[in-house]
Image: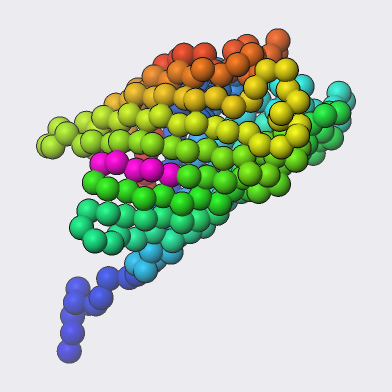
Amino acid sequence: MAMADDAPASPHTVTANVGFTTDYIWRGIAQTSHNPAVQGGIDYAHASGLYAGAWGSNVSWIADSGAIAAGTGNATMELDTYFGFKNSFAQDFTYDIGFIRYNYLGSYTAAAGFAKADTDEIYGAIGYKWFTAKYSYGLGQFLTVPGASGTSYLDLAASYPIADSGFTVAAHVGKQTYKGAAAAAFVNTATYTDYKLGVTKDLSGYVLGLAYTSTNASPFYTYPAGGNWGKSTAALSLTHAF
């Protein structure tokens, strides 16, 4: 008779995470007008490579940009839902394909010239050891820009764990390219490139991070209510997974 310890490992894994950051930066652009954010998520993974999850954070950029018609409500919470498939091939190579929806919770009416912020993307990535190249393609409008199907983001990243130290150093460059007639009509271009350097330290399950980001974003990302969202900035974060 087989002992309980001899039972095969479950192919299902569920993990969760919670964290805090002094500045929520996404693709080089501040999502909270350079204010702190509390974040967290839950993930499911199957041994076959299938995965799905949800992740959330407070945000302020929709209202700060003037994308909400006066007196019609607000959206202060981002909730991302996603699913995909990832696995390895050859030696030291990985791949990842999937879909993500950026949901901005709240009841509001988009101001004239803007769209509701909810956005869908499909993505694909190839990794080799510490390096990853990822391409994301927007479906329909992109964030608050109407008629922007085909807007894309190319992400080149490297992440290197320093053996037996708990430290990981990372570098990233990405380019956000907007498509569509509405984006082409902007006085200042919405297309930009962002850069990031960072380091994390694993402290017995709590990951402390410091990241410096910069962009060449135009004044399109500068608003009276929120300041310059694409300026160079450093952010501290603390995350715990369980």
Residue 137's spot in the image, x, y percent?
57, 46
Decide whether residue 7 is among the magenta residues: no
Q: Nearer the viewer, residue 189 or 75?
A: 189
Q: Which residues are magenta?
A: 130-134
**Quarter where residue 102 is shown:** top right
Report the residue at 63% width, 19% height from top: 221
Q: Is residue 86 visible?
A: yes
Above-or-below relation of 176 to 44: above
Residue at point 70%, 10% (across, down): 224
Q: Is residue 43 left or right of residue 77?
A: left
In the rendered view, tell whether residue 114 sits above or below residue 33: below
Place of residue 73 in the rendered image (x, y in percent of width and height, measured from the top left) = 81, 31
Residue 128 location (% of width, % of height): 27, 48
Residue lying at 50% horizontally and 31% vertically, measured from the top left: 175
Q: Is residue 132 magenta?
A: yes
Taking 204 as reference, is 13 above or below it? below
Q: Is residue 79 visible?
A: no
Numbered-mark total: 0
In this rendering, is residue 191 above or below 13? Answer: above
Image quadrant holding the N terminus, namely: bottom left
